[in-house]
Image: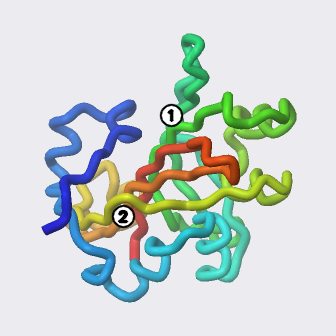
Amino acid sequence: MPAPVDLAPLRRFHDEADLDRLDLQAVQADDLPSTARHLLDHSGDMTSRLQEHHGQPIQVQALAVQFPADSSQVYAREVLLRTTESQRPVEYGAIEIHLDAIAEAPVRERILAAREPLGGILDSAGIVMLSQPTAFFRLQADDILAAHLGLEAGTVLHGRRNQLRLENGHVLAEIVEIVPA
C-alpha cells in the first residue's frame, strides 16, 4: 500500500478542508493510466514532457504567488500550465522553489517573474536538474480544480508529489503536479 501523499506545496494556498474534498488516494506508478503514467512517472522536467506530449510550447499562468518573507528564500506559486497555441490547460500545480539553490541572479529574476515554467527556465539557462517523484495519487476534481482545468467536478485526475534536485544534490523545488489525463 502506498504511503500517504504530502501535499505541502498545495497547503500554502488551500486549507485542509479544501484538500480533503479532493478524495485523494495514494497509488503506485504501475496503477496510473498509461497517459498519466507517461506524463508523471519520469525523472525529466515536466515542461519538456508536456511539450512533447501536446506538440506545443507550454506557458505558465500564476494563480497565486508567495514571495519569501524571511531568510528561508522559499518562493511559492500555484500555477496552471497551458499550451501556448490552443491555451488548453495541461497541468495544475503548486511549487515551492528554494531560490538560494540558484546562484545566477538573472535566473532567479526569471523565476520570480512567474511568466515561464520552471523547467523551461532551467533548460534555457543550462541548469541540469533531476526530477524525483516521491508519490503518485488519484483524486476527484472539486469545483475549483475542475474550473481551472476545464473539466466537470468529480472528474478523476492523477498527480504526483515531486522533488527537483540540482546536480550537486541540493533540493531546488518541492512540487505537486496534477494532470487532466
117 shown above or below 31: above
Residue 149 location (% of width, % of height): 42, 61
Classed neighbour count for the residue bearing mark 2: other residues with Cα under 10 Å, few (<14), some (14–19), many (≥20):
many
Lateral position of residue 26 relative to residue 82, left or right: left
Q: Residue at x 32, y 76 (%)?
A: 29
Going by the picture, which residue comes out furthest to the top? Answer: 70
Lateral position of residue 3 relative to residue 165, left or right: left
172 shown above or below 69: below
Q: Residue at x 42, y 67 (%)?
A: 179
Three-letter residue code for mark 2: Gly
Nearest-to-viewer mark from 1 and 2: 2
The colour scheme of the drawn protein is: rainbow
Name the image quarter holding the C terminus: bottom left
Q: Which mark is residue 169?
A: none
Give the distance between the C-alpha atoms of the residues marked 1 and 2, in whole angstroms.
20 Å
Lateral position of residue 87 relative to residue 106, left or right: left
Going by the picture, which residue comes out furthest to the front? Answer: 168
20 shown above or below 28: above
Secondary structure of the residue carrying tag 2 is: strand
Residue 58 location (% of width, % of height): 67, 64
Three-letter residue code for mark 1: Ala
Residue 177 location (% of width, % of height): 44, 57
The residue pinned by badge 2 equals 159
Lateral position of residue 181 relative to residue 68, left or right: left
Secondary structure of the residue carrying tag 1 is: strand
Name the image quarter holding the N terminus: bottom left
Q: Which is more N-terminal, label 2 or label 1?
A: 1
Q: Residue at x 53, y 33 (%)?
A: 76
Query: Contact, CB < 8 Å: mark 1 with mark 2?
Result: no
The residue pinned by badge 1 equals 64
Q: Residue at x 62, y 64 (%)?
A: 45
